[in-house]
Amino acid sequence: MRYLTAGETHGPQLTGIIEGFPSNVTIDFEEVNFQLARRQKGYGRGRRMQIEKDTANIVGGVRHGKTTGAPIALVVENNDWKHWTSVMNIEPIEGSDETKRRVNRPRPGHADLNGGLKYNQKDLRNILERSSARETTMRVAVGAVARQFLAAFGIKVAGQVIRIGEVEVNRQELPIDELIRITEESQVRVVDKEAEAKMIAAIDAAKEDGDTLGGIVECIVEGVPAGLGSHVQWDRKLDGRIAQAVLSIQAFKGCEIGIGFEAAKLRGSKVHDEIMYEEGRGFYRASNRAGGFEGGMTTGEPIVVRGVMKPISTLYKALQSVDIDTKEAFTAQVERSDTCAVPAAGVILENIVAWEVANAFLDKFGGDSLEEIRNNYNGYLEQIRQY
């Protein structure tokens, strides 16, 4: 499978096309929009989330509630487009730089300057409109479709916030359904109520100071069989593919699988997961420090992925920049922004990881229809049972 997205943050719509998705998968439209609504929640979000009420319309590839095997086309309209119809019009317009809302002062931490240099654009709005995290709206919608494919095989996806700024949660091992329930009720998607209060206070303090906060988010995928991905080529290692996808999310600067960087300070006996066997259960690991991966392949244990999100680059306490016209120093121009989007980033992470797992699942079990894939999957499970 593959997908493409198109559209700008203040354009008329965001568009996504999924190719290679199997037929006869039931699509719950409300579930897709539920994921989009989750992305818009979270303490610390800005005014844009009050303007946009994201709803995905599927305009191709689904008939009578089931996929047909044809490319799936999704559209999310931007409600704010009505205020930008002149500025973002595809037709040539007459007017001053002010009328066109030209951006000539690149913002530190954004793609503005690099993109302007690469594409030879003297209006940096042509860069920031596409590089904006608004693009993740469509990636969440795509991931929401992939999640429904995974759900047909009993695979569940959950997520939680681990850290915001200097505040870190006390980790708790919970059943995945309970984790989902508790985090959905939290303003910052945590299970630790004491940490939640501290995180909210930290966000308030940063907002008061015109600053922003980043953090760490975690995704857990449960019910994945052993053997997704492969050791035979570097680009077939599923943990590597997931890491690339995670780092493609706007503002993400790091990814770890399992205990990740903590492994660097531990002895091997405290890192590797011992292999066990039980009649009726088969092979399993006594622990899951590897986060569900060995040799680039799933072990059958839950996949555990964390992503590091830097503080949002747009600050109301503007940082210094340089005018690309005059080359003089100025404070960077401010676009509308959030104080903290870490809870929303967790939702994005879930759906990005869901897509990669679904893609690897289809690579492994093949087939053009859900029924064909299920037959292949059941045959593989029987092969494992007899191993």
Image (cartoon, rainbow, N blue to C red):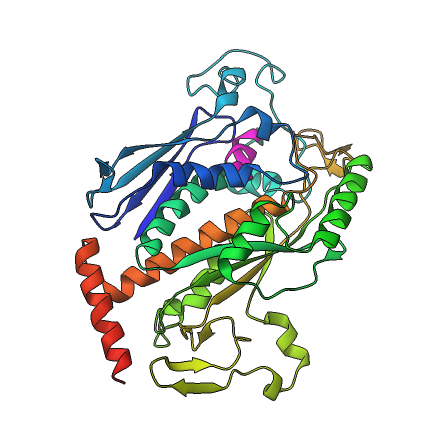
Camera-side residue of 187 and 144: 187
In the rendered view, would you say 34 is above or below 161? above
In the rendered view, would you say 74 is above or below 377? above
Quadrant containing the C terminus is bottom left
Q: Residue 199: percent from the left, percent from the top? A: 74, 48
Q: Is residue 340 visible?
A: yes
Q: Identify the residue shown where x is 39% and y is 53%.
A: 355
Q: Residue 338: percent from the left, percent from the top? A: 66, 36
The image quarter containing residue 225 is bottom left
Camera-side residue of 374 and 129: 374
Residue 128 lies in the magenta stretch: yes
Q: Is residue 249 visible?
A: no
Instruction: Say left or right for 158 vs 253.
Output: left
Residue at the farthest top position: 94
Q: Which residues make up the magenta segment?
A: 125-134
Instruction: Say left or right for 46 vs 35.
Output: right
Q: Identify the residue shown where x is 42% and y is 80%.
A: 284
Q: Identify the residue shown where x is 42% and y is 73%.
A: 296
Q: Identify the residue shown where x is 66% and y is 45%.
A: 109
